[in-house]
Image (tube, helix red, strand yellow):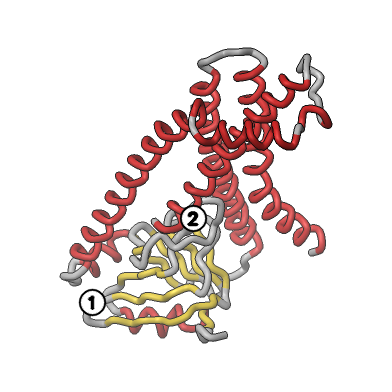
Amino acid sequence: MFTQQNSTRGGKVLRYLWPIIFTIVFAVVGAWGGNIAHETSITYVIVIAYLAIFFGIVIVMGIRSTRTRFREIEEYMKVSKTGAVEKLTRDDFMKAMEKDPEYMQETNKFVKSQMKNMVVLMVVLIGLLMLYTYVLSGGPFISLAKYISNTVNIGYYLKPWFTQTIEEANLFYAYFIDYLIYFGVFFVLMYVIFRVMRMPFMTTSVQISNFPYTINKELIIFKDAMLIDGMYLLKSPIPVKQVIINEKRRFVEFELVKPLPGFPYSKIRIYHKSPRELWDKAMKNLFRVESENK
């Protein structure tokens, strides 16, 4: 248990530490290329490389989270001695959905909002790339960085081995500060944008919208857990804020206290021809309703 807790804590620290290290490394490379190598194209190359590697790392972290979930599911299936209490397939869900006239309206509204978010995100990314590349190469960032470097005279105290003079060292640190500001502001803006748009970024507990995740592939209910679409395992007791049984629209919907890792939804909806029967027969003992003020 101690090792597992340390591993979890270490993973959280690494998740927030790597962007800082990542930014510093790219700032050093960018400052060296622009000042020492005197390559005018280094600005564009370093910015594009930063974006590519940055989002690549985010994707890799997501893949690792997915693999962890699948390992947990495999381990549970191996040690679980209880068979499935209930198993629902796509046909079961689709038949119940057909009786809900509001489902398509809700879905269309959600898809439109997500498409709008993606368009806004792309526009912002392109705008930031164009704006900050200009600012980085000759705007206020470099002016501020040169002022700081020359005023403090950093090169006199910390002269890099690859610089010949103190003036050249100060110029290197000016570009280094310039890139730090650039990449730091970019990261903060991206974090704010993703959080405002309720999209996963640097965290696994983000709710992308108030729209419920509707199970439409497979649901297996055990005595002490439920497996959603073969990808998400919820073990009893499942802490929820509330449970809604809508017999008219034929679904059971529950709101999690905290979203699952890698699952940016807080609400989960299960369509069934007899939602009350499903709840009483297989689901009611799996949940623990917690107060929102708790």
Q: Which mark is residue 231?
A: 2
Q: Position of residue 28 (x, y in %)?
A: 67, 28
Residue nearer the viewer, 105 or 198: 198
Seen at 43% across and 82% down, the residue is: 242
For disc 2, the neighbor class at 10 Å (few under 14, some 14 to 19, many from 20) is: some
> Label 2 sits on what residue type?
Met
Q: Nearer the viewer, residue 153 or 109?
A: 153
- The answer to whether residue 139 is visible is yes
Structural distance between the alpha carbons of marks 1 and 2: 26 Å
Farthest-out residue, left: 101
Say left or right for 180 vs 153: left
On-image quarter of the N terminus: bottom right
Q: Nearer the viewer, residue 245 or 88?
A: 245
Tag 2 or tag 1, which sits nearer the N-term?
2
Horizontal side, residue 52 vs residue 102: left or right: right
Q: What mark, if any, has residue 249 been given in the picture?
A: 1
At label 1, which amino acid type do we have?
A: Arg
